[in-house]
Image (cartoon, rainbow, N blue to C red):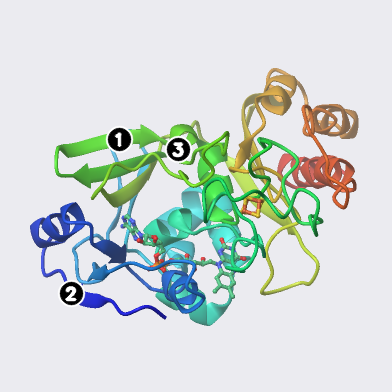
Amino acid sequence: MHPFSYTRASDTREALNAGRRGGRYIAGGTTLVDLMRETVERPETLVDISGLPLREVRATEGGGLRIGALVTMAETAAHPKVRALYPVISASLELSASAQLRNMATLGGNIMQRTRCTYFRDVTAACNKREPGSGCAALKGHNRTHAILGTSDSCVATHPSDVAVAFAALEATVHLLGPDGERRVPFADFLLLPGRTPNREQALRPGELITAVAIPALPRPLRSGYLKVRDRQSYEFALTSAAVALHLRGGIIREAKVAAGGVGTVPWKLPAVERHLIGERPSAALWAAAAEKAADGARTLQHNGFKPELLKRTVERQLRVVGGTK
Ligand SMILES: Cc1cc2nc3c(=O)[nH]c(=O)nc-3n(C[C@H](O)[C@H](O)[C@H](O)COP(=O)(O)OP(=O)(O)OC[C@H]3O[C@@H](n4cnc5c(N)ncnc54)[C@H](O)[C@@H]3O)c2cc1C
Ligand code: SF4
């Protein structure tokens, strides 16, 4: 680990001042410290933000929710409002990491976590994300777990967060505070496609702090859930996953929100699947036909050719579970 200095911010202003001077925020520390041990990350100054007042979950006008950036994964998953309004968020968190990690890790840190691509974490390997211009060892290497959507010739790494898939499906907004004041970024614009600059991962400006994630009000009743397919049943990242939320009235699907994980370089919203569902009556045939569109545009690598089919089956199964037909 490289030497670093540590400071604990006692209020938001102090944190922003330290952030503006190049300090790196640390919340639960569950992923940043690992990366520092592996020397993938080498911040000179850590700014501990865990004492800031960003720990509230509250209802917003119209029936949405605002979840503070420092609310832990465990607290978010267990929160009565989250459980009642958006079970897909609770489920995605409960299927993430381990109980110990969920007790420490925060929501802001979760959506900021970096890829689990093994080459990214091996400082001896070529990796454009870690070392721009060095190449991408995954393109011709072990790429079984890598992305099939949103990839570029520079990077094919997946975004590992589960709850980010739920946020993408529900069209959440990220609330930010920086030296120039507050701003709000739609979740779809917050995490960046790799393109030619895979080292740029989020739409954060220097020194900006995530203060909250807001979930919009959606028509009620809203059924929702998350399915995660992985190599082992716990403590493992997704090979594929599906976040689904459906609003039915009079037996017709009036609103559909669907996104996939484990397959995209960012959580992958599935608008073609959503469009296929809206205005239709639930049926096994409908779920299958909609899920057929889930892998549109997929580009496979040598070892992940199984992912398009697995993705379609994951989406179909979760549509069936949430939509309520056999
Ligand atoms: C073994 C293991 C298994 C895991 N499995 C899963 C899994 O299955 N699914 C899943 O989704 N996740 C998984 N994770 C990741 C875990 O969820 C993250 O480590 C955790 O959410 C990060 O939160 P943190 O508060 O500890 O972040 P930190 O480590 O403190 O910070 C992470 C990053 O976020 C930045 N940051 C933190 N808060 C803010 C803020 N408010 N504003 C701006 N920047 C900020 C930091 O600067 C840093 O770059 C796993 C982690 C481990 C170690
Ligand atoms: S896939 Fe991305 S993170 Fe992995 S080695 Fe290639 S450039 Fe690096």
Work out whether residue 196 or residue 74 is closer to the camera in this orientation and state it. Answer: 196
Quarter location, residue 283: top right
Quadrant position of the C terminus in the picture: top right
Observer able to see residue 55: no
Give me the C-alpha separation between circle 3 and circle 2.
Answer: 30 Å
- Among the two numbered marks 3 and 2 on one chain, the one whose residue lies closer to the N terminus: 2
Residue 306 is labelled as none
Work out whether residue 192 or residue 45 is closer to the camera in this orientation and state it. Answer: 45
Callout 3 touching callout 1 (CB < 8 Å):
no
User: Residue 269: x, y in percent?
Assistant: 62, 34
- Circle 2 residue: 7
Quarter location, residue 5: bottom left
- Circle 1 residue: 184
The amino acid beneath tag 1 is: Arg
Query: Dot 2, crowdedness within 10 Å: few (<14), some or many (≥20)?
Result: some
- Among the two numbered marks 2 and 1 on one chain, the one whose residue lies closer to the N terminus: 2
Q: What number of labels is visible? A: 3
Query: Dot 3, crowdedness within 10 Å: few (<14), some or many (≥20)?
Result: many
The residue at the point 24 percent across, 69 percent down is 45
The residue at the point 65 percent across, 25 percent down is 271
The amino acid beneath tag 2 is: Thr
Is 161 rendered above or below residue 234? Answer: above
Query: Dot 1, crowdedness within 10 Å: few (<14), some or many (≥20)?
Result: some
Circle 1: element type: strand
The amino acid beneath tag 3 is: Phe
Mark nearer the viewer, 2 or 1: 2
- Circle 3 residue: 187
Q: Is residue 57 left or right of residue 84?
A: left
Circle 3: element type: helix
Q: Is residue 263 left or right of residue 208?
A: right
Give me the C-alpha separation between circle 2 and circle 1.
Answer: 27 Å
Mark 1 lies within 8 Å of ligand 1 (Cβ measured) = no
